[in-house]
Image (spheres, helix red, strand yellow):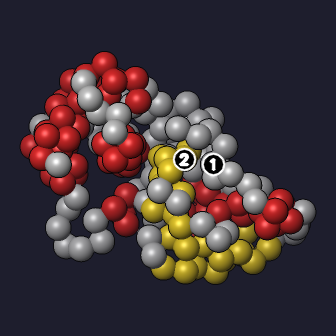
Amino acid sequence: MSATGPALTRRDTTALERGPDPVRITLSVNGTEHSLDVEPRVSLLDALREHLDLTGAKKGCDQGTCGACTVWVDGRRVLACLTLALTCEGHEVTTIEGLAPEAEPHPLQRAFVEHDAFQCGYCTPGQIMSAVALIEEGHAGDDAEIKEWMSGNICRCAAYPNIRAAIRAVRDQT
């Protein structure tokens, strides 16, 4: 998982020169364009939660160590608490709210319920976003591989065996 977010392009580095006052940015989140005014130092997590009212990604540690804030930027897992919102202009951000935009939950969301893969539920959005990417990346071969590739997502309730069971169930369906 990238701790710094998407790779910076020339356009992104020019964006970083703006500020220190709030700047207008446009974020594409879950297929919808949003224009908002943010200070250049605002994290993607804070932009999502505080400016766009998308509260699925959680602020767990705010240091990039727990994975509760995991979202995708251009299909890659990123820690939204360590990614500047400004750097996501021109990139597609996907949150847990956009994982299954239709009325039906994503298969992994259903598997988390069926396999009791959560207790308090706080880490669940980040776990699911990482797990879907893990399967798509081809890193769900066995429990050891799943454990390694999910190691950036901490579950304080220790539901790891059930999380792995949910991942295996979806892996075996596809």
Sequence-first tag of 1 and 2: 1
Q: Residue 144: give x, y in percent of width and height.
A: 31, 19
Q: Is residue 45 above or below residue 169?
A: below
Task: Identify the disc placed on residue 59.
Answer: none
Task: Identify the disc placed on residue 78.
Answer: 2
* Identity, as a three-letter code, of the amino acid under mark 1: Gly
Q: Residue 96: give x, y in percent of width and height.
A: 37, 58
Q: Nearer the viewer, residue 106 or 154?
A: 106
The residue positioned farthest toward the top in the image shown: 144
Q: Residue 41: give x, y in percent of width and height.
A: 77, 56
Q: Nearer the viewer, residue 10 or 118?
A: 10
Q: Residue 69: give x, y in percent of width and height.
A: 49, 46
Task: Identify the disc placed on residue 5.
Answer: 1
Q: Residues within 10 Å of mark 1 (few under 14, many from 20)?
A: many
Question: Which of the 4 image quadrants contains residue 131?
Answer: top left
What residue is rendered at 68% in x and 51% in y?
A: 7
Q: Nearer the viewer, residue 122 or 64?
A: 64
Secondary structure under the numbered disc 2 in the rendered image: strand
Q: CA distance from mark 1 to mark 2?
A: 5 Å
* Identity, as a three-letter code, of the amino acid under mark 2: Val
